[in-house]
Image (spheres, helix red, strand yellow):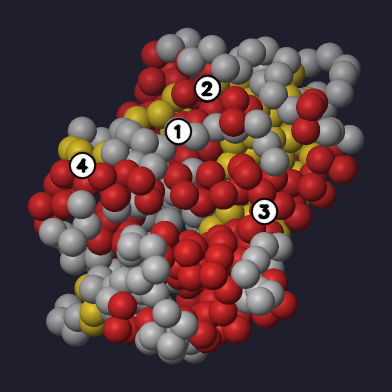
């Protein structure tokens, strides 16, 4: 039994935050510069009463409505999010009820960010190829906007809210692996560089947390997302090329064998530098963040879906995906596109 | 990479006119050295095949300090 990605759908909240909106809020941050530096024109923002489960339900319903499978055929739900509806219960349990799935399904949350989709693929493959499940619904959903201080233009410019629903299912018959190999990595020394300090057990959320302003004029409190851009960038330059090279070596793939590279859509600037560093041709390197921003664990499935819809991905194409970021955490995988 | 080449790249990063930066100037006085500029400097170093620790950049006060970070990648 082999596991394969069979369908992807995604959902973006209705409210937009455009570069013109940001330029109005931050007069020293003109719209043209925002697009030039980030590659983003607009990002979506969840409504005040819209949580990760709402986005996940919407994405999953698109999957079902487009005929990927029926709800009763799902036997496991993996919900990757760092903005759960509640600390407890598990958001995946809420999804089971709201999507009308059978009660005889497994459902767990995976607390992971930018690498979460690839980690989810690895977990789904394990469940399927050990006979524990046949159809895994992998949901990636984030509402980072709820952690972002309105006065922090650095992260407001980058992050957008979204959810993706991916069906990973068993494919019968013998043949080469359709999902894998995988390369994983973790370096907890990077934890302070992308963090919401308060709200967990380590530091309770402060109702009247004092504001701080950094050297670039960004305002935040301990209740808000902090990102050390330069450190994140340096980390990316160190781990991404090594992981891609290692993965290709394990898989026996050269650049010419891979039809599409889909890296985490962190920012346009970072993607452009990585593409040139990896010496990858532009036409085989996905860039799909202009109208949604950095949607954390949903960037890769959104890019895959967009490539397929644009006719840039065909059945049998070899694809390399890699997520990297918060943690620090990273994961890369090879897959055969099997719609 | 020459020292003049580094100054030219820093002028591009900080969107300043050619010839406007000298090695003795402080980064603070230029008013354009922010986290985005640091990211682009890291990318510039990477293009020279040099991995720079962002904490070393944080310790830089002058343009000369930035050039020193690049080590033997800068000649002349």
- Is A272 above or below relative to A240? above
Q: Which circle's residue, 3 or 1, is located before the other in the chain? A: 3
Q: Dot 4 falls on which chain?
A: A
Badge 3 is on which residue?
A240
Q: Are marks 3 and 2 in contact (CB under 8 Å)?
A: no
Q: Dot 1 lies on which element?
A: loop
Residue A70 on image: x %, y %? 49, 16
Residue indicated by mark 1: A288
Inter-mark Cα distance, 3 to 4: 30 Å
- Gap in angstroms between the C-alphas marked 2 and 4: 23 Å
Q: Secondary structure at mark 2?
A: helix
Disc nearer the start of the sequence (4/1): 4
Category of crowding for the residue at label 2, using alpha-carbon neighbours closer than 10 angstroms: few (below 14), some (14–19), many (at least 20): some
Q: Is residue A151 left or right of residue A261?
A: left
Q: In which chain is the residue bearing label 2? A: A
Work out whether mark 3 precedes mark 4 in sequence or the reverse, and give the earlier one: 4
Q: What residue is shown at x 31% (from left), y 78% (from top)?
A: B30
Q: Same subunit under labels 1 and 2? A: yes
The answer to whether mark 3 and mark 1 are in CB contact below 8 A is no
Q: Label 1 lies in what chain?
A: A
Q: Are marks 1 and 2 in contact (CB under 8 Å)?
A: yes
């Amino acid at each position: 039994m082999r596991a394969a990605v069979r369908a992807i759908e995604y959902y973006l909240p209705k409210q937009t935050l455009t570069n013109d909106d940001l330029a109005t809020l931050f007069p020293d941050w003109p719209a043209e510069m925002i697009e030039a530096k980030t590659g983003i024109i607009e990002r979506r923002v969840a409504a005040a009463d819209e949580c990760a489960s709402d986005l996940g339900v919407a994405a999953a319903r698109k999957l079902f409505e487009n005929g990927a499978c029926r709800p009763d055929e799902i036997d496991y739900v993996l919900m990757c999010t760092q903005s759960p509806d509640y600390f407890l219960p598990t958001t995946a349990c809420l999804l089971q009820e709201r999507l009308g799935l059978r009660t005889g399904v497994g459902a767990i949350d995976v607390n992971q960010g930018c690498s979460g989709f690839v980690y989810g693929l690895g977990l789904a493959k394990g469940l399927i190829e050990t006979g524990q499940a046949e159809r895994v619904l992998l949901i990636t959903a984030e509402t980072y906007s709820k952690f972002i201080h309105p006065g922090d233009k650095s992260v407001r410019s980058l992050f957008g809210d979204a959810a993706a629903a991916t069906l990973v299912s068993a494919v019968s018959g013998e043949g080469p692996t359709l999902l894998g190999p995988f390369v994983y990595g973790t370096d907890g020394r990077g934890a302070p560089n992308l963090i919401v300090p308060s709200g967990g057990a380590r530091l309770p959320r402060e109702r009247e947390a004092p504001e701080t302003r950094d050297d670039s004029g960004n305002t935040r409190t301990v209740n808000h997302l902090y990102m050390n851009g330069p450190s994140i960038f340096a980390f990316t330059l160190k781990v991404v090329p090594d992981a891609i090279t290692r993965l290709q070596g394990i898989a026996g793939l050269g650049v010419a064998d891979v039809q599409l590279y889909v890296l985490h859509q962190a920012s346009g600037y970072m993607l452009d530098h990585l593409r040139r560093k990896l010496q990858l041709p532009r036409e085989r390197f996905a860039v799909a963040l202009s109208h949604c921003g950095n949607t954390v664990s949903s960037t890769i499935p959104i890019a895959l879906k967009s490539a397929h819809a644009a006719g840039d991905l065909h059945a049998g194409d070899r694809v390399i995906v890699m997520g990297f970021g918060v943690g620090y955490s990273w994961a890369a995988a090879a897959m055969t596109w099997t719609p | 990479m020459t020292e003049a080449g580094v100054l030219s790249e820093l002028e591009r990063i900080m969107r300043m006119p050619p010839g406007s930066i000298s090695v003795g100037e402080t980064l603070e006085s230029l008013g354009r050295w922010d986290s985005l500029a640091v990211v682009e400097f890291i990318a510039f170093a990477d293009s020279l095949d040099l991995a720079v620790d962002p904490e070393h950049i944080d310790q830089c006060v002058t343009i000369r300090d930035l050039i020193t970070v690049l080590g033997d990648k800068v000649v002349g």
